C-alpha cells in the first residue's frame, strides 16, 4: 500500500512532507473514522497500510452495522457475526453490496442445505428506521422443503404503526405513491447461522414498484432482487426473483400501518419455488454469488428487465398454444369431414 504524504509550508517558507502516520491515531479515530459510512471507510482502508490498520477496528464496523441495520443488534446475531473471519467488517462486505446478475452454477449434490435461516429485516422512511425484526426459520422439515417458499414477518392480525400519513383516498394518490417509492427502503439480510461467513442481502433496497390494491385500497410496496436460478439458458429457471412485498394501510390522514411483510421466490413463468429449491438458490448465492457496488435504481432496472422477459416468454407460450389449438381444430374438422364424406358416398 502507498504511504499518504501531505505537503506543508513552515513559517520560514520551506515545504516539508509529512505522512498521515504522524497524526495521532486518537485524532484520526474520533474526528475522521467515526464519521464515515461503510463504503467510505472501506475505501479509506485501501489508501495505506497505516489507515488499513486503523480502519479495521471492530468497534468501527460494529457501529456502522448497527446504525445501518438496527436489527443486527439482536443478541444472537451479534454472537453469529462475532464468529465471522473479520467480525462486523466481514458481515458488512457480504450484506451491503448488490448481487451481480450472473448465472449461478448450482450443484445440489455439493451444496449443504442449511437447517435454519435467520432474516434481519429493516424498513426505513427517509433514512429513518420505522420497522425492524429478526425472524428465525427452521428449514429442515419435509413440510418446509415441499411447500411453496414464503416468509411472513407479521401475523395476519398484527400491524406496525409508522410516522407516515396515509392518503389512500386523496386525489393526489399517484403523487403520494411516487413519494413512497422514492422514500421507502428495505433491507432483508439472510444469514446461515451454521456457517462462519454466510450472509446476503436479498432486497433491492429501493422499491421497484408501488401499487394500490383495487379492492382494499392497501398500498403494496414491492422490493425485488433478481438472481441466477441455476437453470439452462432459456429455461424458466434461468433467472428467479426474490420478491418482498410490504403491504400498508390506514385511515385517510392518519398514520399508516405496516400490515404485511413477506418474501417469496418466483421463476420466469411466475411460478413459486418450493422450500428446497429456494434454499439451493440462497445457499448458492451466499457461497458463490458475486457482489458489486450498486448504483442508482439498478434494482428497479433489473426488475423491469425481468418482468419484460417474463412477458415475452408468456407471449411466446400463448402463440405456441394458439398454433397448437389451430392444428388440433384443423385435424378435428378434417376428420369430421372425412367421416361424413365416407358415410354419404359409400
Image: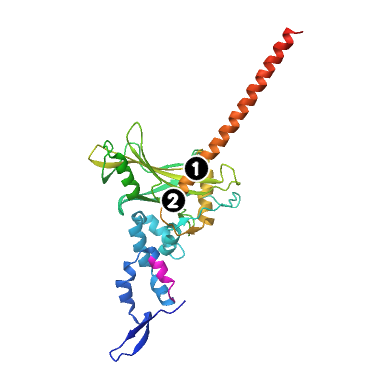
Residue nearest the observer in this picture, 268 or 124: 268
Q: Residue 44, percent across and down?
A: 40, 70
Helix, strand or loop at mark 1: helix
Judge whether 108 appears above or below 21 on screen: above
Q: Is residue 157 left or right of residue 49?
A: left
Q: What kind of secondary structure does the magenta stretch mostly adopt?
A: helix
Q: Residue 14, percent across and down?
A: 33, 90
Q: Residue 247, percent across and down?
A: 35, 40
Residue nearest the observer in this picture, 159 or 48: 48
Q: Is residue 338 left or right of residue 194?
A: right
Q: Is residue 273 visible?
A: no
Helix, strand or loop at mark 2: helix
The residue identified by callout 1 is 308
Q: Is residue 250 magenta?
A: no
Q: In the rendered structure, which disc, 2 or 1, sits on the residue that comes first in sequence?
A: 2
The residue identified by callout 2 is 299
Q: Residue 292, percent across and down?
A: 47, 59
Amino acid at each position: 500500500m502507498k504511504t499518504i504524504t501531505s505537503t506543508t509550508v513552515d513559517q520560514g517558507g520551506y515545504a516539508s512532507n509529512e505522512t498521515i502516520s504522524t497524526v495521532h491515531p486518537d485524532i484520526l479515530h474520533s474526528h475522521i473514522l467515526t464519521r464515515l459510512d461503510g463504503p467510505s471507510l472501506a475505501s479509506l482502508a485501501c489508501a495505506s497500510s497505516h489507515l488499513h490498520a486503523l480502519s479495521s477496528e471492530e468497534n468501527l464496523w460494529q457501529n456502522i452495522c448497527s446504525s445501518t441495520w438496527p436489527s443486527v443488534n439482536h443478541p444472537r446475531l451479534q454472537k453469529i457475526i462475532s464468529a465471522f473471519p473479520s467480525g462486523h467488517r466481514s458481515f458488512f462486505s457480504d450484506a451491503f453490496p448488490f448481487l451481480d446478475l450472473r448465472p449461478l452454477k448450482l450443484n445440489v449434490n455439493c451444496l449443504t442445505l442449511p437447517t435454519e435461516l435467520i432474516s434481519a429485516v429493516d424498513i426505513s422512511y427517509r433514512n429513518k428506521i420505522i420497522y425492524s425484526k429478526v425472524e428465525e426459520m427452521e428449514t429442515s422439515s419435509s413440510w418446509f422443503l415441499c411447500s411453496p417458499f414464503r416468509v411472513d414477518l407479521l401475523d395476519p392480525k398484527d400491524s406496525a404503526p409508522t410516522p407516515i400519513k396515509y392518503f389512500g383516498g386523496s386525489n393526489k394518490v399517484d403523487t403520494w405513491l411516487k413519494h413512497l417509492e422514492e422514500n421507502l427502503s428495505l433491507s432483508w439480510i439472510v444469514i446461515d447461522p451454521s456457517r462462519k461467513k454466510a450472509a446476503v442481502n436479498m432486497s433491492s433496497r429501493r422499491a421497484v414498484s408501488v401499487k394500490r390494491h383495487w379492492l382494499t385500497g392497501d398500498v403494496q410496496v414491492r422490493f425485488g432482487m433478481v438472481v441466477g436460478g441455476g437453470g439452462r439458458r432459456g429455461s424458466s429457471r434461468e433467472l428467479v426473483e426474490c420478491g418482498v412485498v410490504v403491504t400498508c394501510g390506514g385511515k385517510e390522514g392518519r398514520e399508516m400501518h405496516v400490515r404485511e411483510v413477506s418474501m417469496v421466490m418466483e421463476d420466469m413463468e411466475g411460478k413459486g419455488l418450493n422450500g428446497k429449491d429456494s434454499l439451493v438458490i440462497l445457499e448458492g448465492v451466499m457461497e458463490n454469488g458475486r457482489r458489486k457496488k450498486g448504483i442508482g435504481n439498478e434494482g428497479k432496472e433489473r426488475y423491469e428487465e425481468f418482468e419484460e422477459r417474463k412477458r415475452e416468454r408468456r407471449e411466446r407460450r400463448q402463440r405456441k398454444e394458439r398454433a397448437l389449438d389451430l392444428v388440433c381444430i384443423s385435424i378435428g374438422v378434417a376428420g369430421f369431414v372425412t367421416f361424413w364424406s365416407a358415410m354419404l358416398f359409400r
